[in-house]
Amino acid sequence: MSAEQKNGLTVIVLAAGGGTRMKSKTMKVLHPIGGRSMIGHVLTAAQALDPEQVVAVVGHQREAVGAHIHASFPDVVLAVQEEQHGTGHAVRMAVEAATQDGRSMTGTVVVAYGDTPLLRGESLRDFADEHEAAQRAVSILSGIVADPFGYGRVLRNDEGDVEAIVEEKDATPEQREVREINSGILAFDAGFLRSALPRIGNDNAKGEYYLTDTIAIAREDGLTVGAYAIDDVMQTEGVNDRVQLARIGAELNRRIVEGWMSEGVTVMDPATTWIDSDVVLGADVTILPGTQLLGATVVGEDAVVGPDSTLKDCEIGPGARVVRTHAELAVVGGEATVGPYSYLRPGTVLGARGKIGGFVETKNAVIGDGAKVPHLSYVGDAEIGEGTNIGAGTIFANYDGVNKHRTKVGKHARTASNNTFVAPIEIGDGAATGAGTVVRQDVPPGALAVSMGPQRNIEEWALRKRPGTAQASAAEIALAGRRDGDQGMAES
Ligand code: UD1
Ligand code: CA
């Protein structure tokens, strides 16, 4: 096949139908699955054909569907099908759009549906290549299935040549026995498609214009038609309801997880591991059970993630260890450790060999190389220098009730337990704080900040103020013991 033919390729994606069986406010093709919208998977597959143009036919909720397509695939041309009179009518709208505004449609036209998220670009390419090599007017991407109910059946004559597609509702009992089905994906010679579309009628059980009638039309014209059976029929399976959404979603995930295992990633429990389509994993990454890697997450070589972690749009450095963590838009440096029970919010950047420990929440926090926030802390709108250790139970008080303020802690500082850093403040390099300090003013480099007054003990307070309680009697016994001990000492 020549380069010109390839360049002439148009892909039409049908997505005007209502998808009522989803029973959703959200249009069917916009439902997320494997980290993309359903139609996002199909439009991504379409790009593998390196098409001249891609046309999406929108109808139901066309503003929402159109806006989504425009945002994620700005080159896709939108065709509007106001009322859905069938796949033949939908393609007519697409062809009108594909030939407007100076655009032209020559070469091959591939028609696909927007609700088949398992569809792979390579399969579309193989199909288009086969169609072009055979120089057909129409090719059907068919499949052999155990239960063909609901599908259009591919009808062949005694010689095995494809003659027509008959829809379930229009088929005779004998035709319904045929197990070769129309996946819905068809390839056309553009000239033939243009000539055939006006000749499609709607005299059938649904009263719709069936795109599949083009097969019989081509035969009448004496043109070549044929079917190319895809082995992996699931790729063309449409999602119509939420049960199928979950089933196809699990299958998509199974394929992605197996793909990464074959690339050298250890996945201890594939059934409880969820990896979105756009995630990237390095060699020898280990994923422990109950882990979700979502969005554009990237995990570097040798890192271990899980168990029970959700990372969305995160970047995890090589050799890092992330345990029981929820993180979004966070960056974790190489060989750093996070968790268990850590919550990393957007803007968290942990340096190499750093640590964010148990019950620590971070947000807009840049934590330097080797710096540690090991226990029970909130770090918001902060910068922590390299090698600094933040004491257990430290709160970076970033919000004064109206505005957010920043805290800066220098390098190699040692702040003690149960501190509050009232922003905006700066704690210098090598500075320290005492336990329980409320830091309201800047701490110069190397200084020790203490804010608690000297401790004062009011003797026998519990005995006077809590008489008759377990607290008072415990104190009484202990004090008596001390007095006996003192006597013993005195006697010896
Ligand atoms: C269609 C095929 C059938 C095939 C099956 C595979 C026809 C006549 N039938 O049947 O041979 O086996 O798909 O799943 O083509 N759409 C529009 N506008 C319309 C009608 C449909 O955009 O006016 C879109 C729908 O949103 C959907 C796709 O086209 O994505 C298929 O439409 P649907 O009504 O589901 O066709 P089927 O009856 O399943
Ligand atoms: Ca369908």
Image (cartoon, rainbow, N blue to C red):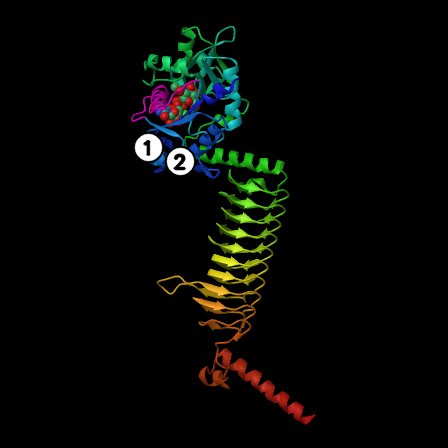
Bin the neighbour count of mark 1 within 10 Å (Cα to Cα): few under 14, some 14-19, many 20 and up: some
Label of residue 409 in the image: none
Give the quarter the ligand 2 occupies: top left
Tell me the magenta residue range.
81-106
Q: Residue at x 62, y 50 (%)?
A: 319
Asked if residue 63 is among those painted magenta in the image, a careful observer would answer no
Secondary structure under the numbered disc 1 in the rendered image: helix
Vertical order, 403 against 75 (above or below): below
Residue plotted at (60% across, 85% down)? 481
Three-letter code, disc 1: Arg
Q: Looking at this view, is 476 or 380 the one in front?
A: 380
Q: Is residue 105 magenta?
A: yes
User: Left or right: where does residue 192 sit relative to residue 131?
Assistant: left
Quarter of the view holding residue 193: top left
Q: Is residue 143 visible?
A: no
Looking at the picture, does residue 330 appear above or below residue 452? above
Residue 22 placed where, x, y %? Answer: 38, 34
* Of 205 and 230, the residue lying toward us: 230
Q: Which residue is mark 2?
A: 30
State the residue in front, 137 or 489.
137
User: Which percent across, then down, holds residue 7?
Assistant: 47, 22
